[in-house]
Image: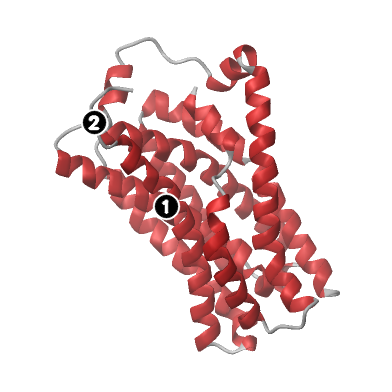
Amino acid sequence: MTSQGSGSRPGRLKAVAGGAAGNFIEWFDWFLFVSFSLYFAPIFFPPGDRTVQLLQSATVLAIGFVVRPLGALAFGLLADRRGRRLALALSVALMCFGSLLIAVTPGYAEIGIAAPALLLIARLAQGFSVGGEYGSSATYISEMAGRRYRGLWSSFQCVTLVLGQLAALALLLLLQAVLSVDQMSAWGWRVAFLVGAALAVAVFYLRRELPETQAFREQRKAAPPKVPALKLLSEHRRETLLVFWLTAAGSIGFYIFIGYMQKYLTLSAGFSPATASAITAAAENGGAKLDHGSGGEVLLRAA
């Protein structure tokens, strides 16, 4: 990483804003699944107990986490070999694909087992995408910021992560306010994923115009970088596993809260979906800061 960013200060500010905006959309789309599963779970899974359907959607959510470190590794290698800009554009394009697939996939009543299968494919794509986004955008923003403002501008990555989550909840509250419960269950949740896909398309075209970082241009003149995961596991195995476990402990608690509390308030405590969502949103305004993404993703890119 060089001591200075790339280009003039206004140019760097625009580039940092582009990187942060994409990060916002990535996490907005990622959290739509968590926020709206109360409505789409009965659509994608076999009819029966509603709790079982929500547990099945939670399983799909969990599987999405499995591919996040793989996305971090793949997009990290791509960013080091072909450029940060390409990695950022492809990651948001993949997120768009996942959101659009969820929005247009027919339910279990229409296509049977293919419905949850397509939902799983969409979530795998989103997990792979957000894994690549986290490390790639952190690298791009920090390289563009320059030494003097690197800490300040890099902080916008975490800021946009939390804002993406809160924006997903805000959209849920808005749709609940203007649509009936039957409309939300029938098609209202699809609107949210269409919004996510449309915003991802806009950011894709924005990221195509981002300048490449000076650090990458200088790196291309040197020898090709080593595979970061192999370097971490061979030279820093204990430290790597320690950070993975520490990050996993906090993230598991965070996602159990944001993924389960809304469902508990609705199914067990007897609140309406709209009230449960409002309570969850109010609580998450104070608790969202506990999530700092996947430490594995940052490690794989940082090396």
In the displayed structure, 299 sits above or below 68; it is above
| Tag count | 2
- The quarter of the picture where residue 288 lies is bottom right
Please state which of residues 247 and 206 is positioned toward the viewer in this rendering. Answer: 247
The amino acid at mark 2 is Gly
Res. 108 visible in picture: no
Res. 60 visible in picture: yes
> Which of the marked residues, 1 or 2, is nearer the chain's N terminus?
2
| Mark 1 touches mark 2? (CB < 8 Å) | no
Give SS at disc 2: loop
Give SS at disc 1: helix
x%, y% of residue 203?
35, 54
Residue bearing the label numbered 2? 5
Q: Residue at x 53, y 60 (%)?
A: 99
> What colour scheme governs how the chains and residues are painted in the rendered image of this protein?
secondary structure
The amino acid at mark 1 is Val
Dot 2: within a 10 Å radius of its alpha carbon, few (fewer than 14), some, or many (20 or more) residues?
many
x%, y% of residue 270?
76, 83
What label does residue 141 carry, if any? none
Mark closer to the observer (1, 2): 1
Tell which residue pokes out farthest to the front in this image. Answer: 286
Q: Residue at x 65, y 77 (%)?
A: 276
Q: Residue at x 73, y 61 (%)?
A: 57
Tell which residue pokes out farthest to the right in this image. Answer: 48
x%, y% of residue 157?
41, 46
Residue bearing the label numbered 1? 159
Could you tell whether 73 is left or right of 46 in the image?
A: left
